[in-house]
Amino acid sequence: MAKAVLLILLSAYVITEMPQASWANRPEEAPKEKVTNLQFYFHDTLSGKNPTAVRVAQAPDSDKSPTLFGATFMVDDPLTETPDPNSRLLGRAQGLYGSSGKQEIGLIMAMSFCFVDGPYKDSTISLVGKNPAMNPVREMPIVGGTGLFRMARGYAIAQTHWLDPTTGDAIVGYNVTVFQ
Ligand SMILES: *[C@@H]1O[C@H](CO)[C@@H](O)[C@H](O)[C@H]1NC(C)=O
């Protein structure tokens, strides 16, 4: 008899507790997603006395490879408002890219876009992914961020604006879409 009462009390407890568990997961309580679009130009300079991209590592045969397979570069590339290198400096792309393709030119990119001016000053976004740099348009993942871009994810569409094929110097337009 006591056992039966206890069972009834316990099941009543479970039933009253149940709705609360699903309460917290009501879809209307999920925060609204924010979308941000960013546009800037990336200036990658390998030549001259003050390069912003320097080769820091390579494989023994990188120079014999048509794609420089294994060559790895450290960059601190200015990000500007227009293709003009003297236009407003919005930030800097700091990180690495390395040649990860043997058959075709493909760079593995791992860098932070660190904003120094404008509405996103002191915030960063992180880009990691393959950049088939010879394609006129390519897409790369945005995997995170800091400051105003905390918990961000999204994608970057890059388009070469100008390229010097002898030095490798390039100006690349970036369109970045970020979701939070
Ligand atoms: C961003 O995309 C738009 C539409 O395709 C294009 O007109 C613009 O030039 C792009 N911006 C950059 C910086 O590449």
Image (tube, rainbow, N blue to C red):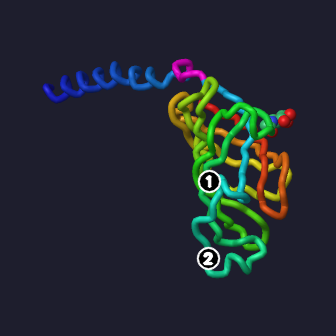
Neighbor class of circle 2 (other Cα within 10 Å; few <14, some 14-19, many 20+) is: few
Q: Secondary structure at mark 1?
A: strand
The answer for how far apart the CA atoms under marks 1 and 2 are is 19 Å
Q: Residue at 25%, 26% (x, y): give it.
A: 10
User: What segment carries the magenta color?
Assistant: 28-32
Residue 88 drawn at (x, y percent): 71, 31
Residue designated by label 1: 75
* Number of dots carrying numbers: 2
Neighbor class of circle 1 (other Cα within 10 Å; few <14, some 14-19, many 20+) is: many
The quarter of the picture where the N terminus appears is top left
**Upstream in the sequence, badge 1 or badge 2?**
2
Residue designated by label 2: 59
Question: Which quarter of the figure has residue 105?
Answer: bottom right
Residues 102 and 10: in front is 102
Q: Residue at 70%, 48% (x, y): give it.
A: 140
Q: Secondary structure at mark 2?
A: loop
From the viewer's perspective, is 53 left or right of 9?
right
